[in-house]
Amino acid sequence: MKRYYLYMHCLDTPAETPFYIGKGCGLRAFSFERRSHRHQEMLDSIGLDNVVVKIYPCVSEEAAYAREEKLVTQYRTQGVDLCNELPGGPIRCTVTGVSVDLW
């Protein structure tokens, strides 16, 4: 059974400000490959030694998505410039008029 979590990539500063928030399982939070261009630019700018990874276990994948969406919105409302390209949560895709949730 997969164990899902919310994770944040944060700057290694006293405030530990997040620059990315995501949903993951396994070692996803510690994988810095297959990231967006903006995320990679941030890593290149600050260096991996200056990244703090925070993990918050969730009871389900759906709970992790909900928490991700809530925190992305919360931090953006507070003016934090996240590398997230999407607002968090499951991706919705509409193909030929049919709307599908992609988990």
Image (cartoon, rainbow, N blue to C red):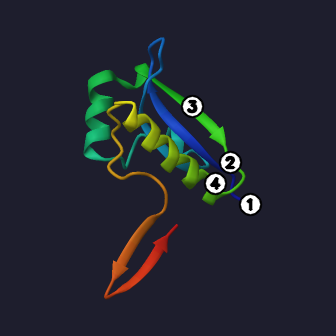
Element class at badge 2: loop
Front residue (pair 56, 74): 74
In the image, which is nearer the foreground, mark 3 or mark 1? 3
Q: Earlier in the sequence, mark 2 or mark 4?
A: 2
- Number of numbered discs visible in the structure rendering: 4
**Residues at circles 2 and 4 in contact by the CB criterion of under 8 Å:** yes
Query: Could you tell which of marks 4 and 1 lies nearer the N-terminus?
Result: 1
Which residue is painted at 39% across and 30% down in the image?
78
Other-residue count near label 4 (Cα within 10 Å), few / some / many at <14 / 14–19 / ≥20: some
Q: Earlier in the sequence, mark 4 or mark 3?
A: 3
**Which element type, helix, strand or loop, lies under badge 3?**
strand
The percent coordinates of residue 32 (x first, y second) are 42, 40
For marks 1 and 2 on the same chain, the one whose residue lies earlier in the sequence: 1
**Residue 103 position in % (x across, y down):** 52, 67
Q: Nearer the viewer, residue 53 or 73?
A: 73
Residue at horizontal 64 percent and vertical 54 percent from the top = 63
Q: Is residue 31 visible?
A: no
Q: CA distance from mark 2 to mark 4?
A: 6 Å
Identify whether 73 is placed above or below 81: below
Check residue 58 in the rendering and tell me which mark sits there, or answer none: 2
Residue 54: assigned label: 3
Q: Nearer the viewer, residue 51 or 21?
A: 21
Q: Residue 1's mark?
A: 1
Give the CA separation, mark 4 to mark 1. Answer: 15 Å
Label 3 and label 1: CA atoms lie apart by: 22 Å
Q: Which residue is mark 4?
A: 63
Amino acid type assigned to the residue bearing label 2 in the image: Cys
